[in-house]
Image (spheres, rainbow, N blue to C red):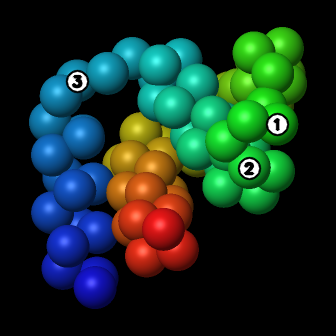
Amino acid sequence: MDSKIKEDANFLFEQKYTYEDLCWMLAEIQLKYNKGYDNVSESAIKNKAEELKKSSLKNDDICWKIAELNHLASENE
């Protein structure tokens, strides 16, 4: 499992997304994973992304978290 997450995180990192884009993606996947895909508004994602931008997370940490949550979400389908 860790090797797949690492591979996905590395791929995401190599895409050279901006920090803002990565924060948005992480906010979206976190909220959708926790609240369900139909229960998340764009304003909630925006607020969560702003929160994440203020954190001390680095790009590679955000990529790892996105890959990890994507993996968990796919396991729960």
Q: Where is residue 58 in the image (x, y as percent from the top left)?
A: 48, 43
Which residue: 47% across, 19% down? 21
- The reply to whether callout 2 and callout 1 are in contact (CB within 8 Å) is yes
Q: How many labels does the image show?
A: 3
Q: Whole-percent x and y of residue 28?
A: 63, 34
Q: Position of residue 57 (x, y in %)?
A: 58, 46
Q: Which percent across, then down, holds residue 53?
A: 68, 27
Which residue does the numbered mark 3 point to in the structure image? 16
The N terminus: image quadrant: bottom left
Instruction: For label 3, count other residues whose C-alpha is less than 10 Å away and answer few (under 14), some (14-19) or many (20+).
Output: few
Compared with 2, 55 (above or below) is above
Q: Do the residues labelled 3 and 1 touch (CB within 8 Å)?
A: no
Is residue 60 in view?
A: yes
Q: How far apart are marks 3 and 1 (CA)?
A: 29 Å
Q: How far apart are marks 2 and 1 (CA)?
A: 6 Å
At horizontal 20% and vertical 73% (from top left) the residue drawn is 4
Report the mark closest to the observer, 2 or 3. 2
Discs 2, 3 touching: Cβ within 8 Å: no
Kindly identify which residue carries mark 1.
Answer: 39
- Per the model, the C-alpha gap separating discs 2 and 3 is 28 Å
Mark 3 or mark 1: name the one nearer the start of the chain.
Answer: 3
Q: Which amino acid, mark 1?
A: Asn
Q: In the picture provided, is 34 more to the left or to the right than 24?
A: right
Q: Is mark 3 on a helix, strand or loop?
A: loop
Lower position in the chain sequence, tag 2 or tag 3: 3
- Which residue is tagged 2? 36
The amino acid type of the residue labelled 2 equals Gly
Nearer the observer, 77 or 3: 77
Secondary structure of residue under mark 1: loop
Task: Using a 10 Å C-alpha cutoff, classify the residue at mark 2 as few (fewer than 14 neighbours), some (14 to 19) or many (20 or more).
Answer: few
Give the SS element for disc 2.
Answer: loop
Name the residue type under label 3: Lys
